[in-house]
Image: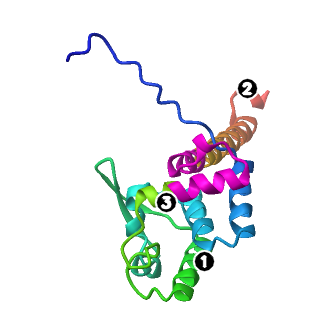
Amino acid sequence: LQSVGALEVDDVQPELTRTEYLRLLTTARALDKERLYLLVKLFGCTGLPLQELPRVTVEALTEGRIIVRSCGIVQLLHLPDFLRKELLAYARREGTVSGPIFHTKSGKPLGRTAVTDSIKQLCRDARVAEEKANPRCLKHLWQTTRDGFRAQLDRMVEQACDSLLEAEQLSIAWDSRE
């Protein structure tokens, strides 16, 4: 079969709000689901792609860096210090001395379906729309938050630059001597 024209794909991802994200974390804590709490926090604080979850290892956390490959691009993932410490403490409590932090009882890395299903169940418990129940929405929240901070920083840099140039203008401009 051949398709004539462009396919219409409804690829609009629902937006997870910061309040919903915090409700997910609070609910995971209230239900005493530490692994799920840390998974939500990891995706929401780092933008880690789900397929790169096995790279979150004790060794990588000890080094303080995780190298991820996403869309053919290799990059160094920044892990906030508080999250790195939480993940290492979790690994110690679970008896994980090396390898992936998140794994099954048999030691295999946690699968993508299991992660998504767990987050979906947490969304039900936290009264968050189920279409937002995936790591992609958490990653998008991280990107949106980061982009907002960058926009604020850009505005602050522009304001500082304008102030500096205005001060120079007032002190040495041709018209200011009159």
Q: Nearer the viewer, mark 3 or mark 2?
A: 3
Q: Nearer the viewer, residue 120 or 98?
A: 120
Cα distance, mark 1 to mark 2?
60 Å
Task: Please say whether residue 47 is visible from this viewpoint.
Answer: no
Mostly what secondary structure, the magenta segment?
A: helix
Q: Which residue is mark 2?
A: 175
Q: Which residue is mark 3?
A: 115
N-terminal label among 3 and 2: 3
Q: Quadrant of residue 163?
A: top right
The C terminus lies in which quarter of the figure?
top right
Q: Nearer the viewer, mark 1 or mark 3?
A: 3
| Label number found at residue 12 | none
N-terminal label among 1 and 2: 1
Kind of residue indicated by mark 2:
Asp
Verify whether residue 142 appears in magenta: yes
Q: Nearer the viewer, residue 164 or 177?
A: 164
Residue at image coords 57%, 87%: 93
Magenta stretch, residue numbers: 117-143
Sort mark 2 into few (<14), some (14-19) or many (20+) by Cα contacts within 10 Å: few
Q: Percent from the top left, x then y, of residue 70?
A: 35, 52
Kind of residue indicated by mark 1:
Glu
The N terminus lies in which quarter of the figure?
top left
Cα distance, mark 3 to mark 2?
66 Å
Q: Percent from the top left, x then y, of residue 145?
A: 63, 47
